[in-house]
Amino acid sequence: MLLALGTWPQASQARDTLVWILRDLPPTTIFEGPQKGRGVIDQALPVLMASLPEYDHQIVHVNRARGMQMLREQPFVCDPALMFNRQRAQWIAFSITSFRVFSNGLAVRRKDSDGLQPFVHDGHIDLRALLASVPHSVGVVAERSYGEQIDSLLAQAPPGALIAHYGNSAIGNLLQMQRRGRLKALIGYQPEIRFQAQQQGIDPNDLEFYPIQGMPKYQSVNVGCSNTPQGRQAVERINHSLLELRPHSLLELYAEWLEPSLREQYRSDALAFFRDTPLR
């Protein structure tokens, strides 16, 4: 018995440490300002960690490049807010959908929206045609995945069509460039762009937001972990937790950041998705 008791503390200390990497990505995660810690993942991650008591947990703040490097090189790292694409899936183990978000779209100043009308069809922007038109420059966050369809269009853009900005303040900087007339439009999530506009002293109501032609109404956000035995095992456990958390907790945390007129439709659509495709 003494021998068994003597080994117990060592066993308890041998638990794996799951490193959670967070990027400053309002309103998913908010590192600074009066709304610090009130992002969707800021509030959801403690609940998710509590549902995984077999691991010790560590949170690390990183930029985009460092986060991707850690997922590639370290054995037990998870990012709670990643967009799936097939290239990443070669070296990242992805969970089922954690929550649904309105797809990326194009933001333009209302006073400049008339110039985009030749590219607008049924309220959606023809991004391919817009990128092919020389006078229009479109801002993007460098190295971000906007989903496979948009990524493919951006990869085919002619030289000079895109203005890419690096860093944690990329969207804010692109909005400032837009205000100064250095670019016409930028691509991003509507809640993110509205949040960053307010941070830059720009009235979000001065911006017009267009869905992108051919894109689904919603995109899925996933947890992504190191594609190692530890990471894949954690994803299995995370999937069980997400089945409980996402229909209510995660759904409502995201809905709070939407314009009030969009919330009820979002709730209905998200619940239908989780009901009809529970393992996606």
Image (cartoon, rainbow, N blue to C red):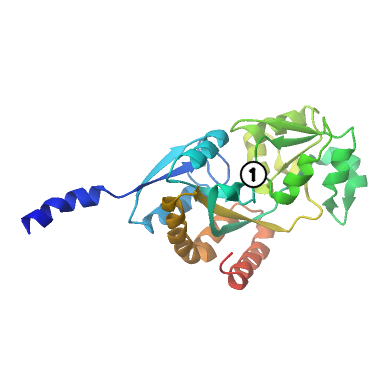
Q: Quadrant of residue 215?
A: bottom right
Q: Position of residue 190 (x, y in %)?
A: 69, 47
Q: Quadrant of residue 234?
A: bottom left
41 horizontally vs 57: left or right: right
Whether residue 34 appears in this view of the structure is no
Residue at the (64%, 38%) spot, across then down:
196
Q: Position of residue 267 (x, y in %)?
A: 62, 64
Q: Indicate the secondary structure of the residue bearing disc 1.
A: helix
Residue at the (84%, 54%) spot, across then down:
123
Three-letter code, disc 1: Glu
Q: Quadrant of the C terminus?
A: bottom right
Residue at the (24%, 47%) spot, across then down:
13
Q: Position of residue 139 (x, y in %)?
A: 75, 35
90 horizontally vs 212: left or right: left
Q: Position of residue 30 (x, y in %)?
A: 52, 41
| 95 to 65, vertically: above or below | below
- Per the image, the residue denoted by label 1 is 192
